[in-house]
Amino acid sequence: MNTTNMLLAAPELWVLTMACVILIVDLFLREERRGIIHMLAMITLIFAAIITLRADYLSEGLRSATAFNGSFIRDPMGDVLKLFSLFVLGIVYIYSKFYLRQFRMFRADFYTLSLFALLGVMLLISANNLVTIYLGLELISLSSYALVAFDRESKRGSEAAMKYFVLGSMASGMLLYGMSMIYGATGSMDLIQIADAISTRGGDDLLLVFGMVFLVVGLAFKLGVVPFHMWIPDVYHGAPVAVTLFISSVPKMAAFAMAFRLLHTGLGELHADWQQMLSLLAILSIVLGNLAAIAQTNIKRMLAYSTISHMGFVLMGLLPGTASGFGAGMYYVIVYSVMSAAGFGMVILLSARGVEAEQLDDFKGLNQRNSWYAAIMAMVMFSMAGVPVFVGFFAKWLVIKAALDAGLVWLAIMAVIFSVVGAFYYLRVVKLMYFDEPVTESPIEAPVDFRAAISLNGVMILGLGIFSSSLIAVCMSSFGA
Amino acid sequence: MASNWPILSILIWLPILGGITVIAAGAQRASLARLLALVISILTFVFSISLFTSFDTTTAAMQFTELEPWVATFDIFYRLGVDGFSVPLILLTTFFGVLVVIAGWEVIQDNVHQYMAAFLIMEGLMVGVFCALDAMLFYVFFEAMLIPMFLAIGMWGGPRRVYATIKFFLYTFLGSVFMLIGLIYLYIQSGTWSILEWHQFPLTLEVQKWLFLGFLAAFSVKIPMWPVHTWLPDAHVEAPTGGSVVLAAIMLKIGGYGFIRFSLPITPDASAALDWLIITLSLIAVVYIGFVALVQKDMKKLIAYSSISHMGFVTLGLFLAFAIFQNSEGGRGAALGVEGAMVQMISHGFVSGALFLCVGVLYDRLHSRMIADYGGVANTMPWFASFAVLFFMANSGLPGTSGFVGEFMVILAAFQANFWYAFLAALTLILGAAYSLWLVKRVIFGEVTNQEVANLKDINAREAFVLGTIAVAVLLVGLWPQPLVELMHASVDQLLQHIQQPKFTVAGI
């Protein structure tokens, strides 16, 4: 019994061990040999992926398996999300190494903190119990707070971290409060038992509904949807780009998994109640995110508001409560992470000599400086705007289809209208790169692994679009759709 | 040519992959980029001719079909096929594919490889639009096409290019997302993305009306119809010559093609119920925009407005059918309207493309598009003047040129529908002649007005080749339209039979 538990949680245990190993190894390393830390972190990710792929429970014909008294679950959705978390984090590390070296912040703390955050992500993805959910969530949050303040000299970073910490703690408090009410109403912490309790006793319980409202608030904060989005622009702006890159991609996948587990596995019976709340959150995010992004001159803030609108689209996938809806949401969140990584990767690429390329104007005339990088950024922008044949388009149409399936025509119409509004600010970046003259002629230099990673990332955005079939099939089959 | 070649895929992917090759190979050597682009576009054109020669005109069924699964989870297929409506438009596309490359030969000096690649990729995507029989595939091509055009206008356009190109992109994007919702709705209802199966799929009148409006949003912007035409003059004026040519000659036709492929057969009853709307808007475009064209000071703008007015004829011809059915004379009247619309699209493709090339010739020399800056060009550029006069005559519908055939067929059909439709439509013969010939008078004839015009050099061999080829096409379609009409005959008959059957009675609703 115990070995089965351990085996199911093997990827998490491996990441935990390696995070501790890296922490210790760093003590004995001289500064110029820090590259070893990077290598160790990459090895951690690769082996974690291999262990995750060896999903023995699937060979026994099961769709999922639980461990530790049902508080931990392995299922195809979780595995796919973990694999993509590992993959995206690998890309993040390659981008970050270049950035951290350039900005003299190449310290092992970045790797240990982000590996602990990754552990939280993996735990949250597999959490099947209110306690595990909270544990995973706090692991991500605490690591992220520290990461945001990673640049010790930056006042803006400390301010952002403070903001993030205060608001994040409040959201965690809300979530805990909600959990306690749910526990009070159902008498259990286990999501399956909660679902059973609700279906036998009915969902008409005031305490239960209140608990759900608090859960949704906490969830909305972590996803960063309107009106719980206030931290996003400041944190994205204040944090070093390498950290923004991390918090804008990997944890989103965990947040999606958490939303699925809480709302569907646990509170599936209350679908009608949370659907209303989520549709309001979704539409507000799409509207406000896209409108506010237009006014930004700072690319980090622009991408922050664009994240808000993208998370609105993810919620649209969750809304219908159907398998194909969840599949659409999962596809969206994966695709978003890949696009976001490429977008912030480009910001890192253009940063030179200790100055972050965070103004939109830094992208001016990029096509003349290097047309391949300009093409990558253009693909990211068109993909985020939802123009075919890039992968972002398929993500958008899947969630729109999910909304139409559920009969939410007005939501679908609002979503497409505001994605046209959103297209404007994405096009503006393309305009700066292609139609304007460069302000500087200095060549863009990057190490070979960076160039390979960003090229792969850009080609993925096109390739996953043209050959979209397999990833869509994987996401849909994770939910049996 | 082996008949089992996937000829449609070749026509789509040869220019697209070719464009990528041009970008990769021609970055340092502009001459290599030009040459490569020329070879690829000529190859594509040659392939498209084999499509024409082996096309069977006796059947309305789809030919050269290809079927591969694309996104199997959602029944999306890579489904291609052509009929009498698409073949002429594909030929038009590949024909202009070659001419655009030649027209940009010396004119474009910056980023030549990207210019050539943009137009090659655009060509492949536009052929894709005309071949796609899967609605999702159609939508992907329909939208993806915007990207190279957006870049082409923005990178090589005039002073207000950024405004024009963003307006162009957002306008068309907004129109097509409404269609996307309609398409997804149809998929949810029918379980397939096949456009041909949708033709047979029964729908209630209520649903049809909403779908019709969704399609209208996309195609009326694309074609464009009054009052959503305002992006077109801006885009035309600011676009480089090649961009204007492709925009006018082919991209506008995609709107008309959309009406034929989607609106009419998928929502025939809604089309019948709302035909008054299209006919009214078309007549407004024909008459009012004709007057607007009359007062333009900028040559490109004048041609742009004349395009809108001519596209009014296309939508008019397509939607006259229902009024003609009601007059119960039946027979050829409705077919005349639809065939007239198709001929008008092809003819306008040649003529407007040629006119923009003519303006391009002048602009390359004097860097002005203003009518007032010219005068007496015929004295210094006699060869150019003869071509330009021919094309402007064709634009005003002179018998013997292609412009006459389509307009005449539509006006004839309009008479069978309603005298006043025909009367208003026929006004174009006066208005078209007025704005075209007045422009000719001010720009080409008369005394040489200034020193710059006096110093003009006549067209070189390259320009003469481009204009000459189109001139032959214009006269050929004008004097001998029979092969073109025969090409689409079977498809037109089938379409008209189809749209006479109410769809909701099939459903028993």
Image (spheres, coloured by chain):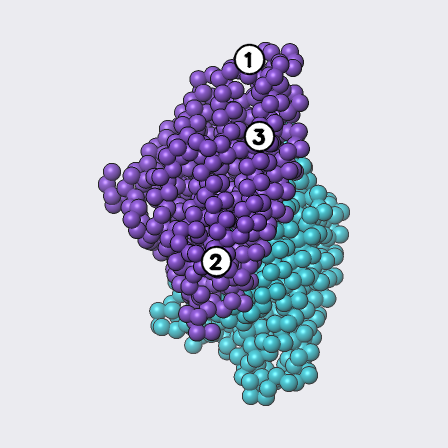
Q: Quadrant of the N terminus of chain A?
A: bottom left
Q: Disc 1 versus disc 3: distance between alpha carbons?
A: 21 Å
Mark 3 or mark 2, earlier in chain? 2
Secondary structure of the residue carrying tag 3 is helix
Q: Disc 3 versus disc 2: distance between alpha carbons?
A: 35 Å
Toward the bottom, the furthest residue is A201
Labels 1 and 2 in the same subunit? yes
Residue at the image point whose x is 63% and y is 67% from the top:
A279
- Give the quarter of the image for residue B378: top right
What amino acid is found at the position of numbered circle 1 in the picture?
A: Thr
The subunit letter for the residue under badge 2 reads B
Residue at label 1? B380
Residue at label 2? B327
Residue at the image point whose x is 69% and y is 48% from the top:
A294
Residue toward you, A80 or B445: B445
The image shows residue B52, relative to residue A170, as above or below, that is: above
Colour representing chain B: purple
Colour representing chain A: cyan
The subunit letter for the residue under badge 1 reads B
The subunit letter for the residue under badge 3 reads B
Disc number for residue B338: none
Disc number for residue B436: 3
Mark 1 or mark 2, earlier in chain? 2
The image shows residue B461, relative to residue A426, as above or below, that is: above
Measured as percent of width and height from the top left, residue B263 is found at 49, 56
Q: Are marks 1 and 3 in contact (CB under 8 Å)?
A: no
